[in-house]
Image (cartoon, rainbow, N blue to C red):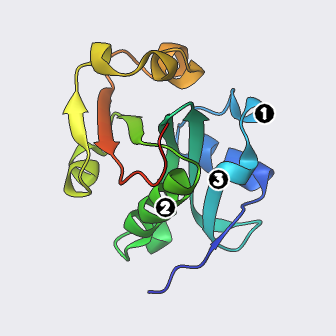
Amino acid sequence: MSHAFHRPDSAAVHAMLAANALPTSDLPNLDMDLFLGIGQTDQPDGVIGLQVIGCDGLLRSLVVAERVRGQGSGQALVGGLEDLAVMRGVQTLYLLTNTAEDFFRKLGYVKIDRKFASEGIRQTQEFSSLCPEDAAVMRKVLPSQSPC
């Protein structure tokens, strides 16, 4: 299955995240240009977002519609987001998850103790208040193209 990325409609991102019990309260504060979608703009098959904090990035809100799961959409979205992160100068990408630790491990992410996340990442709303304390914290060092 081929995956063409687009900037998803913010209302569609909100609806998709809410339907999958993912945080939405901080979406108005995020740069929607750093979200990728696949499928239709107003009704995407999947979305993912990036929050850039200096040389670090927070992979946010990966959701794939149930009707297209198992077709490589999640992996394609993560790959597209990693490319976007590298273009934005991100050297280390972090994420928090309660349900997809095995999925991300297969993509090269390593589970770390919360205290080893960078200060900037620890101060994001997602890290500090939106995700539960027992969420797995994972990170991946990206192939950097620019010094930070």
Q: Determine whether, in the image, residue 28 is placed left or right of residue 67.
A: right
Task: Tell me if 8 is positioned left or right of 87 in this view.
Answer: right
Gap between marks 1 and 2, in whole Å? 24 Å
List the residue tagged with mark 1: 28
For label 1, the crowd category at 10 Å Cα-Cα, with few meaning under 14, some 14 to 19 and many 20 or more, is: few
The answer to which of marks 3 and 1 sits earlier in the sequence is 1
Rendered location of residue 16, percent (x, y): 63, 51
- The residue wearing badge 2 is 83
Q: Are marks 3 and 2 in contact (CB under 8 Å)?
A: no
Q: Amino acid at mark 2?
A: Asp
Sequence-wise, the earlier of marks 3 and 2 is: 3
Q: Which mark is residue 35?
A: 3
Inter-mark Cα distance, 3 to 2: 12 Å
> Residue 78's x, y, as percent?
43, 58
Q: Earlier in the sequence, mark 1 or mark 2?
A: 1
Disc 2 residue crowd, few under 14, some 14–19, many 20+, Cα 10 Å: some
